[in-house]
Image (cartoon, rainbow, N blue to C red):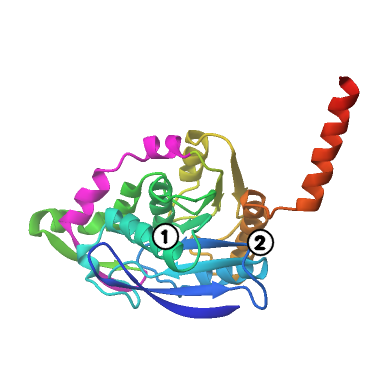
Amino acid sequence: MNTQKLEIENADGLKLAAKLDLPEGREPVAYALFAHCFTCTKDFKSAYYISRILTQQGIAVVRLDFTGLGESEGDFSDTNFSSNVDDLVATARYMSDQLAAPQLLVGHSFGGAAALQATRLIPGIRAVATIGAPADPAHIGHLLASSRAEIETNGKAEVLVQGRKFSIKKQFLDDLDEHEMDETIQEIDRPLLVLHSPADTIVDIENATHIFSTARQPKSFISLNEADHLLTNRSDADYAGTVLAAWAMNYFAKPEQPETNNKTAQHVKQLRERLT
């Protein structure tokens, strides 16, 4: 795929780093916006592999680094679930102005919850998909359980996530508690695809069951078999991307076919003339 670097300004005036993955040698049939997992980046392997599969099917993808992560500006400790949602909205606005409005919104893990929340805020989204997403962003609190008392007492704490240290402030926990996801999920009026692994030990598959049962139709569920939460096995990421692409293509705007449309209109006219 053809990859280009982007720089996007968020609501706070900070520069977000992003990558635009384009299909090789063809015009995109649609654009997708990808939200990475908690403390991950746009360059996380699963995000790259899924994007690669989507571009092979003609879908262009924008992968961004949330504020304070990867190459984006800002302090991670000042971010929260709400700021992630705001970053998605800012990126979608940039895409609409400079590229094309995103029609597909994809979120992995914590990014999946953010994608669900952002769907109603982004005009033009035709379909949304979650991968290993929690049914409630507050679920991420279990990763911080051992440090929660320190965070509550001192206002912040150093937390080890995926082998790296991050500073988490009390405002992060407070923000998690402010979101009621059931209502958000029920209000989604776009097709939804839920991808989740029964072997996920970070976000239990019951989260996927809750999202799926709460959402309205049309909705689809795909089991990712024995994949781990981060889809570290490339074959699992490729499978997720392949299923996602095939599903999403059903919901993109189809190009007009004047000749076919004219023939259909003429046929309808002839039938009406016979009936009268």
Q: Secondary structure at mark 1?
A: helix
The residue positioned 46% from the left and 57% from the top of the image is 107
Quadrant where the N terminus sits is: bottom right
Residue 60 visible, this angle: yes
The residue positioned 34% from the left and 55% from the top of the image is 85
Question: Most extreme residue toward the top, as rendered?
Answer: 276
Foreground residue among 239 and 160: 239
Q: Position of residue 221 (x, y in %)?
A: 60, 45
Question: Most extreme residue toward the right, as rendered?
Answer: 274
Q: Position of residue 64 (x, y in %)?
A: 41, 69
Q: Position of residue 200 (x, y in %)?
A: 50, 55
**Residue 91 highlighted magenta (yes or no):** no
Classify mark 1: residues with Cα within 10 Å, few (<14), some (14-19) or many (20+): many
In the picture, measured across the screen, residue 131 lies left or right of residue 267, that is left
The residue positioned 50% from the left and 51% from the top of the image is 125
Check the image and report above or below for 168 versus 19: above
- Residue linked to disc 2: 242
Question: Most extreme residue toward the left, as rendered?
Answer: 154
Q: Secondary structure at mark 2?
A: helix
Please identify, in this view, whether the residue under mark 2 or under mark 1 is nearer the observer: 1
Q: Which residues make up the magenta segment?
A: 162-188
- Residue linked to disc 1: 92
Dividing the picture into quadrants, the one containing residue 246 is bottom right
- Residue type at mark 1 is Ala
| Total tally of numbered discs in the picture | 2
**Residue 184 highlighted magenta (yes or no):** yes
Foreground residue among 203 and 19: 19
CA gap, disc 2 and disc 1? 23 Å
Q: Position of residue 73 (x, y in %)?
A: 27, 75
Label 2 or label 1, whichever comes before in sequence order: 1
